[in-house]
Image (cartoon, helix red, strand yellow):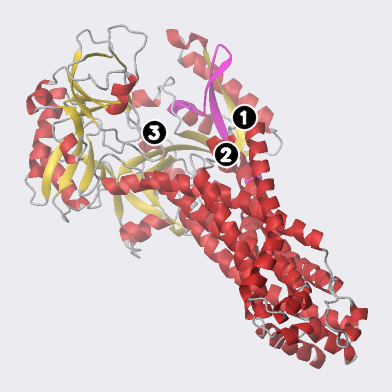
């Protein structure tokens, strides 16, 4: 033990003398191993770890399929009575449960938030393991046709909307017009099965009966909906195929009976496919996380190769120290023990740092990736994964130690002190060193060019000119419920709500429009220069008033805006944008041109042309604006630095009609920033990848150059002894390594060109390479080479020639 302690202390002392080497290894290995730990954890979660539900392999989703003349027409559709029937009448699924996803207003809260809800039958909580923090799930008292108004809320809702009140089970929550007694709160660790979409998170669970109180709807076998799910546990003695056939036969028989006489449904039939929970929840994400792991493994291999180069350089640097040890009687195994101890300390410290890096990455994934990748919120540091990574670290210790000791010519160490110092005992041919540098440069150019291109592309989207203002502008959408409002009633409500809003001191102006400037679901119509033309354009269409363009600061290029009379009379006039004018080939003569919109007999006169507006990642689309909207959608422009809370808005709207609900109230800039989220994430990650790749490339190139410089110590000492300046020595070394750098650059260009030819340049659609990114990459790699030469020569040029000629350092 004393011997081991002495060796440990000596290794620590040696490493303290090379802080640059230690920091470089720690950063390189720590970041790459930490990322590997995260990637392996994610793959273990997706491929190995069981779903967090009891006997999860027996859980299945019965997916409805609609057939027309025996051919599949729609998938993932059910009707209300079909699900209700199968929950009660089939026998292949035990604990069968119906689900209906939706959203609703929590009217008992001041701001009346619109939240995700799920209607379900009692077995749902049993199937998912009854993971409750308080209270209970649904039981037989809340079964179909019992209509008992109770609710189970999510742990998040209890915390955020009820401030974790301890008496939550004595409270009610009003959803829409019905008040529900809260009987349970899901556990914080509860993972809702993502059977609808990854990003959807239910906040309130309600009994099945409250989907609708309409008896006609409960017996409507033709109203298919993609929000229904039928789930259950498959009986052990039945195969999924046999179960699907049994369910199909049973459901199709009753479907045909209930739709008999409905002409359109004569050729329609239904069937049921069973899919496991794992298939539905994971979907196609397995290939995504596997590709992520492969990419990380490539980076780890690159980092490992670079660290090998650093260790070679360090061995060359330690030649004199090892020669002294050998002269004093140290055997080769003693040198190996010292090398292994230093390597173990470095890799062990890197593993500790890697665990911290991995924890940060897991937190990042949980916060920003939960809507993109399944199960990331379940990621934990698994002991099995940690053990696997630990074995990898042990193999790295063995690899680095083996390469280091192989580079030592033990027999020549004893004679080294008596030699003139014309070299070292560590020899790696210049050809191999050139190949190492060329490969490092080629790989760096490829990876940095790719990541920088994606960074620039995302940055271009982030910086693009929207063509409209977002400051102090809010979007307001109102839900009138199930009431049927005539156009006249809607217009009267619009006037009243607009008047209530404009009377507020904080409000500058109010516009009424069919959709906002940042809407991604625009109304597509047709427009042509002549009636019945086959060359019609399909522009995105919006109904607006005279306030819309000035409020959004959308520039009017030609003509004029709508007048209040145009809006009130819904006049046959239109405003178009540049893109539509160009597609119609009337961009210079658009004003007073007649357009035929949809199938209308009377033409619409163009009175104005506005600049294009753009949404993230989408080229400017042709847009057509019509006057006069009867939708309950408003654009509110606040006075500078002023705002109204959602509670205030809810009170204003309900002062007009107590049955109205605020379905959306959001700052336009916040909505636009949400559209930019993916590009922000891409820009951040690819920039980090660029920095990491450049760092690793510099480490690798530095290792090779530093090693080569150590071998030329005697030769460089002669040049300095005869008067060579530091600059001349630097240029001599840089010139020597310029050839492999150029070779590596040419190799990367050849790979890029070959890839473009092989993919018929379709790779550019996925990876938008640009001359800017390639040029900047070349400059960055050149900087890495210059820096590596400078660092590799630092100890040489700062020494006296006499020391170098004796193979010493001053």
Marked residue nearer the N-terminal end (3 or 1): 3
Q: CA distance from mark 3 to mark 1?
A: 23 Å
Q: Give the total of numbered labels.
A: 3
Q: Is residue 564 above or below residue 176?
A: above
Horizontal side, residue 42 vs residue 416: left or right: left
Horizontal side, residue 422 vs residue 482: left or right: right
Q: CA distance from mark 1 to mark 2?
A: 35 Å
Q: Is residue 537 magenta?
A: no
Q: Which mark is residue 619?
A: 3
Q: Is residue 63 magenta?
A: yes
Horizontal side, residue 328 vs residue 707: left or right: right
Q: Which mark is residue 280?
A: 2
Q: Is residue 104 visible?
A: yes
Q: Which mark is residue 17?
A: none
Write the residue at 34% across / 18% down.
Answer: 537
Residue 245: horizontal and vertical position, in percent?
Answer: 64, 24
Q: Which mark is residue 760?
A: 1
Q: CA distance from mark 2 to mark 3?
A: 34 Å
Say few, some or many: other residues with alpha carbon within 10 Å of mark 1 (under 14 / 14 to 19 / 20 or more). few
Marked residue nearer the N-terminal end (1 or 2): 2
For residue 547, which quarter of the picture? top left
Quarter holding the C terminus is bottom right
Residues under numbered marks 2 and 3 in contact, where contact means CB atoms less than 8 Å apart? no
Q: What segment is highlighted magenta in the picture?
A: 55-82
Quarter holding the N terminus is bottom right
């Amino acid at each position: 033990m004393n011997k081991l302690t002495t060796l440990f202390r000596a290794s620590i002392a040696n490493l303290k003398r090379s802080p640059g080497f230690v920091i470089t290894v720690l950063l390189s290995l720590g970041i790459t191993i930490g990322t590997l730990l995260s990637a392996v954890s994610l793959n273990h979660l997706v491929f190995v770890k069981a779903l967090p539900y009891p006997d999860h392999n027996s859980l299945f989703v019965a997916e409805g399929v609609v057939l027309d003349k025996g051919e599949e027409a729609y998938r993932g559709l059910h009707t209300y009575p079909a699900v209700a029937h199968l929950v009660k009448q089939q026998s292949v699924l035990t604990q069968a449960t119906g689900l209906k996803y939706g959203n609703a207003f929590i009217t008992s809260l001041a701001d009346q938030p619109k939240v995700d809800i799920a209607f379900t039958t009692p077995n749902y909580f049993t199937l998912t393991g009854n993971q409750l923090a308080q209270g209970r799930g649904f039981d037989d008292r809340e079964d179909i046709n019992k209509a008992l108004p109770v609710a189970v809320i999510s742990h998040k809702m209890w915390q955020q909307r009820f401030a974790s009140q301890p008496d939550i089970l004595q409270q009610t929550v009003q959803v829409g017009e019905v008040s529900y007694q809260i009987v349970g709160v899901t556990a914080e660790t509860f993972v809702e099965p993502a059977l609808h979409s990854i990003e959807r998170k239910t906040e309130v669970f309600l009994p099945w009966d409250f989907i609708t109180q309409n008896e006609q709807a409960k017996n409507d076998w033709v109203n298919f909906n993609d929000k229904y799910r039928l789930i259950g546990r498959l009986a052990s003695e039945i195969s999924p195929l046999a179960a699907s056939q049994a369910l199909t036969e049973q459901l199709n028989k009753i479907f045909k009976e209930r739709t008999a006489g409905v002409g359109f449904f004569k050729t329609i039939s239904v069937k049921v496919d069973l899919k496991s929970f794992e298939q539905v929840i994971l979907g196609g994400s397995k290939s995504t996380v596997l590709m992520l792991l492969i990419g990380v493994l490539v980076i780890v291999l690159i980092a490992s190769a670079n660290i090998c180069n650093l260790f070679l350089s360090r061995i060359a640097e330690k030649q004199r120290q090892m020669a002294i040890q050998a002269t004093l009687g140290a055997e080769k195994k003693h040198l190996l023990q010292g090398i292994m101890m230093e390597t173990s300390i470095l890799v062990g410290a890197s593993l500790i740092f890697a665990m911290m890096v991995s924890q940060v990455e897991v937190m990042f994934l949980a916060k920003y990736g939960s809507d993109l990748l399944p199960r990331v919120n379940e990621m934990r540091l698994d002991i099995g994964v940690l053990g696997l990574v630990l074995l990898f670290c042990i193999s790295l210790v063995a690899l680095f130690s083996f390469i280091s000791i192989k580079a030592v010519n033990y027999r020549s160490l004893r004679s080294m002190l008596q030699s003139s110092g014309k070299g070292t005992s560590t020899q790696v041919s210049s050809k191999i060193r050139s190949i190492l540098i060329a490969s490092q440069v080629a790989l760096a150019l490829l990876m940095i060019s790719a990541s920088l291109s994606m960074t620039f592309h995302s940055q271009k989207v982030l910086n693009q000119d929207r063509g409209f203002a977002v400051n102090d502008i809010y979007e307001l959408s109102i839900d009138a419920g199930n009431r049927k409002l005539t156009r006249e009633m809607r217009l009267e409500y619009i006037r009243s709500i607009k008047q209530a809003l404009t009377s507020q001191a904080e409000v500058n102006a109010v516009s009424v429009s069919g959709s906002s400037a940042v809407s991604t679901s625009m109304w597509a119509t047709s427009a042509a220069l002549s009636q019945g033309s086959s060359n019609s354009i399909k522009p995105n269409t919006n109904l607006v008033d005279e306030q819309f363009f000035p409020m959004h600061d959308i520039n009017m290029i030609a003509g004029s805006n709508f007048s209040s009379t145009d809006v009130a009379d819904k006049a046959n006039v239109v405003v178009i944008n540049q893109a539509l004018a160009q597609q119609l080939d009337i961009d210079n003569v658009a004003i007073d041109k007649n357009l035929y919109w949809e199938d209308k007999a009377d033409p619409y006169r163009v009175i104005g042309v506005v600049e294009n507006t753009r949404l993230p990642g989408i080229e400017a689309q042709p847009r057509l604006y019509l006057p006069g909207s009867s939708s309950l959608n408003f654009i509110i422009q606040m006075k500078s630095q002023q705002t109204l809370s959602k509670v205030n808005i809810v009170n204003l709207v309900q002062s007009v009609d107590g049955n109205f609900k605020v379905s959306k109230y959001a700052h336009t800039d916040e909505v636009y920033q949400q559209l930019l989220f993916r590009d922000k994430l891409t820009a951040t990650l690819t920039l980090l990848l660029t920095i990491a790749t450049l760092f690793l490339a510099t480490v690798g190139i530095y290792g090779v150059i530093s090693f080569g410089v150590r071998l030329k110590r005697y030769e460089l000492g002669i040049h300095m002894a005869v008067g060579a300046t530091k600059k001349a020595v630097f240029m001599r070394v840089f010139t020597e390594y310029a050839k492999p750098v150029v070779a590596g650059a040419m190799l990367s260009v050849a790979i890029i060109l070959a890839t473009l030819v092989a993919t018929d340049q379709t790779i550019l659609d996925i990876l938008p390479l640009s001359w800017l990114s390639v040029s900047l990459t070349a400059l960055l790699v050149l900087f890495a080479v210059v820096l590596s030469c400078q660092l590799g020569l630092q100890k040489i040029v700062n020494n006296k020639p006499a020391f170098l000629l004796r193979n010493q350092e001053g």
